Amino acid sequence: MMSKIKSLDELKSVQEKFRAGRDPNRPCITVCVGTGCLAYGTKKLVDGFRAELAKRDLAGKIDFRTTGCHGFCERGPMIVISPEKTFYQRVGLDDAAEIIDKTLLKGEIIDRLLYVDPATGEKIVREDDVPFYKKQTRLVFGLNSKIDPESIEDYLAIGGYGALGKALAGMKPDDIIREVIRANLRGRGGGGFPAGWKWDETRKAEGEPKYVICNADEGDPGAYMDRSLLEGNPHLVLEGMIIGAYAIGSSEGYIYVRNEYPLAVKNIHTAIRQAREAGLLGGDILGSGFSFDLKINRGGGAFVCGESSALFASLEGRAGEPRAKYIHATHKGLYDKPTNLNNVETWANVPFIIERGADWYRGIGTAGSKGTKIFSLVGKINNTGLVEVPMGTTLREIVFEIGGGIPDGRKFKAIQTGGPSGGCIPEQCLDMPVDFDELTKIGSMMGSGGMIVMDDRNCMVNVAKYFTNFLVNESCGKCVPCREGIRRMRDILIDITEGKGREEDVELLEKMSKGIVDGSLCALGGSAPNPVLSTIRYFRDEYVAHIKEKRCPAGVCRELIAYSVDQEKCTGCTVCAKVCPTGAAAGERKKAHSIDQAKCTKCGACRESCKFDSIIVR
Amino acid sequence: MEEKVREIIQQYSGDKSYLVPILQDVQKEFNYLPKDALCAVSAHLSVPISRVYEVATFYKAFSLKPKGRYQLSLCLGTACHVRGAELIARNMEDILGIEEGDTTADLEFSFETVGCLGACALGPILVVNGDYHGHMNSAKSTKILKKLGKKVTTDDEQD
């Protein structure tokens, strides 16, 4: 256990002590154990390394570190070996011994574990040379790979809590707020509201206590950057919150985190305990006289609780229903007291702004959006993962240079940003720079940073139905336009995808959207029609094909398609017959098969399994 | 069971804001919220049973019905969706004979779809009692159900 740090000088010497303990030239094996890599079974690899290192008596000679998410989830399990920064990907769970013996002890590179650049076919040895990383600016997220999230010593060794020390020792609360306003830090949870102004409002509001809350109720499907930050670098988020609390004049805070993120909950618990022990959280922080403490609250699995007033209701032990916000949360939030709520990534940016100054921060990004943004790049993309880029990077750079394009040589169709209430962006908008304002202009939004790539086998009407259905399930039911309106929109979309659409439906959808946007109480309803509106705007022809021709061009909507076998291509290998759950696909060995339409449930098993691309969907 | 519920409740003071955390602990212990437990929580926090019920039915994390021996969660996050998770959901519903969110009558299988598990590189993902099965498709899901003891009738067997 660490003893309490009582002053800025003591903090500096503690940081120095831990920094000195980390010899940058000593070999170090770093293994990513974020949730994504753990799902690959990486725990076994970690155990393997520990056992093999112990067996060879290499403790003290080779460092071994488990870290949070590195971002390149597609290629896990992955390890980086310092100081050369050798990058091994898709590491086998039994490869530990070989890696230690060959690479660590003999300096040999293991060829099969290297990343191959699909564009050039070239094998890449160093992590920094991998195109996925090369084009990124990993300001906030990059620290993940340098520290063990369960070790406050690691965080201190890389200068952690330095910004807090600087703030408490040399800055007045107003100075801090001014710096954050000048940096133009905007809310990363989706709203894009300037954080500094919010802080200022809360500071000036009357009422005690004042609350500071971290919104980690990351509910957008396909977005997991907040989880990876909390999991991989919890102290960074804490440091941002403590600085914010000091600036705002708050002594109590909460972290509202999804219960579906057990590793994040565990790591943030550990971090809070460690920070308290080190005198960085609790009473008289760093001997400054300022006190602040935090509680963790696990969400109950309701998307709407990411909305501020619903989140407060949930913290108070009630159903998470939003309320009308005639009075801002900065004046009457949790328990009707002044409350400042910011998202995980917003908090994580704060220490950088305080440490390096607003001028430096303003140097990154576009005129209206400063700094970097972490996106979760998923769906039909070669390099699934978390990417951090300066605001203003184009979608094309993100999808094709960092993301490596679309798998299986298929064609890009759309990229969906902003979560369920965002929009689908077509190819002609790919050269647009991504920031808060540009995305809104083309009918989508930044949201929390999910980017879901779709190819020509994705039906845009089906996608609109998917998101609308998600929002029907997540609507809290309090106000009529949202509860009934979105439901009706979904019913119309279901009809269209089942071939029962009417010509006037598209117009009706547009009309209803306006009513729902205008009449809903909170942002969930207010933005719910976005997926429908943006797909109508950019992919109207697909709606028309479903309605007029009763045809799904992408071959997705079950009621409008039929599976058949291409008699030319089929080799009679019988795989489809084996996987077909209903016996619809059948035929004699070595003769072209066929599909009995009466029995076919259109489950897609035959198409997935056919190695000769001979299943036709029309 | 009473004993266990009391144990959980005693860890919290009577503050009403503990309603959700207590229910989370009860859910974790029993895999559902038994009626008696809801009444006990209501008494402990002096919260009307109607409000306990409201909260218990509002949040997805809670279930008022017992869950099956095998809990199957299929990720229907957007990334999994665009990679065809919907087909898998339909296939599993067909085979299990239940709808998403239900449990088979023999209490063997509970099948639910979930928002996003955040392991999108592995999508579509099926989680069986906490174990991740990545790059799922309809055929693989049928295989997993067979392995877990679900009798899958193919046409040949019907004949």
Image: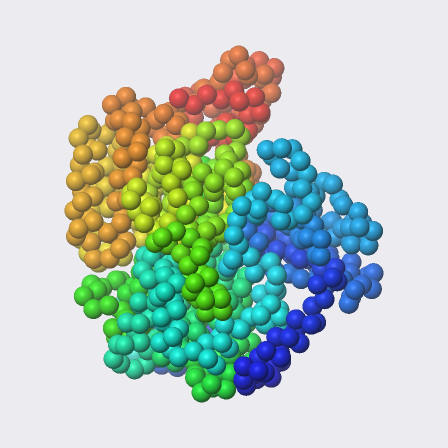
Q: Is residue B77 above or below residue A185?
A: above
Residue A104 can be seen in this image: yes
Residue A356 rendering spot, x and y as whole percentages:
49, 66
Locate residue A6 relative to residue A300 in the image: left or right. right
Q: Is residue A286 above or below residue A413?
A: below
Locate residue A615 relative to residue A470 in the image: left or right. right
The residue closer to the viewer here, A368 or A42, is A368
Query: What scheme was used to colour the molecule?
Result: rainbow
Q: Is residue B75 above or below residue A267?
A: above
Residue A319 can be seen in this image: no
Residue B110 rendering spot, x and y as whole percentages:
45, 50
Residue A149 rendering spot, x and y as whole percentages:
58, 65
Question: Dividing the picture into quarters, in which one does residue A590 lie?
Answer: top right
Name the residue at 44% across, 60% down: A361
Locate residue A86 relative to residue A403 in the image: left or right. right
Name the residue at 83% across, 60% down: A56
Question: Dividing the picture into quarters, in which one does residue A539 lie?
Answer: top left
Name the residue at 64% across, 49% down: A127
Name the residue at 47% across, 42% down: A398
Total labels: the figure holds 0
